[in-house]
Amino acid sequence: MALSSILLVPLVLAYPLSIFLVPAPMAIKWIRTHGKAPMPDAMQASLVEDSRLWYFAQLLIVATILFLWAIFKPSLLDQLLSAMTNPFRHSVEGIAAAAILILSRMAYIMQPNFRTSRLQEHSFAKGPLTIWLLTFVLAGVIEEVWRACCILSVQAGGLGNIISVGGTSLSFVLAHMSGIPGRTVGIWEELLWELLFGIALGTIFIQLNSLIAPYIAGLIFNIFNLCLIRWVGRRWTGGPDDKS
């Protein structure tokens, strides 16, 4: 029991640390040869594109950690499998949750204090759509399994829903901040939204005991958010009536 409790910390941090500690090979090579010297713009642009694909290697590391954790905690695998039953019902629930998230996002960015112009800096504003869609599909699977493993393991350690959801949500934000490029732009409005998004997905998992519902909700919402950010970016650069 003591060992399980100690290992909960690296489990919860497995996602952000796999991204932060395993940067793209080009970044490692530059740091080794040039230290903290600034990278030329052309090379930095190339690094960003290479890192989009490298993200899948980082996800593989997270998946490996989750696999080893499931071996260490065999009962966890049964819980994960039970959370994949009733796929149709939970898919419908996921769609409904996505609709709520979309409406909440629209209301969120319409706040007077939300700096819409900063959305142009969001990583969703750039990069091939096919890579982003593949990221949403594959990363969503890893993220929801990681979230479920963390929540179930923390609860098994005697801690409640608030700590399990709060801890995984903070780690979720750190993971999306990490990497080149990070999936979350570093302004407080987006960091707060990402935290709320993580809490929402964790709550959906706990309330429905389903991996399917939060996955569907996150997938649909991320596709919507990608389209929204790119639309706002075009509107901001092309019209005088854009809000700041």
Image: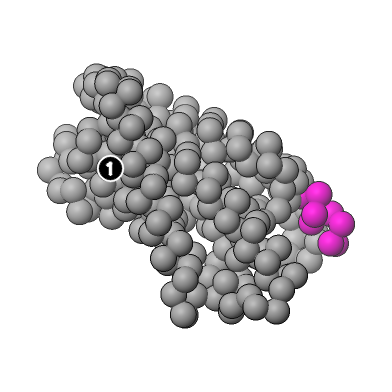
Taking the image as shown, residue 242 lies to the left or right of residue 156, namely: right
Taking the image as shown, residue 166 lies to the left or right of residue 47, namely: left
Which kind of residue does numbered mark 1 sit on?
A: Ile
Quarter in which the N terminus is drawn:
top left
Q: Quadrant of residue 192?
A: bottom left
Taking the image as shown, residue 233 lies to the left or right of residue 136, namely: right
In the image, the segment drawn in magenta is 40-47
In terms of secondary structure, what is the magenta stretch mainly?
A: helix
Tell whether position 43 is magenta.
yes
Q: How far across and down, in percent of the image, does residue 66 sit?
A: 40, 30
Q: Which residue is mark 1?
A: 204
Choose between 134 and 166: the one closer to the eye.
134
Q: Give the residue drawn at x 68%, y 70%.
A: 236
Question: Is residue 25 visible to the viewer in this orientation of the structure?
Answer: yes
Assign a secondary structure to mark 1.
helix
Taking the image as shown, residue 37 lies to the left or right of residue 61, namely: right
The correct choice, above or below, for 10 with respect to 45 in the image is above
Tell whether position 10 is magenta.
no
Choose between 211 and 158: the one closer to the eye.
211
| Crowd around label 1: few <14 · some 14–19 · many ≥20 (10 Å) | many
Choose between 18 and 107: the one closer to the eye.
107
Q: Give the residue drawn at x 30%, y 30%.
A: 90
Q: Quadrant of residue 135?
A: top right
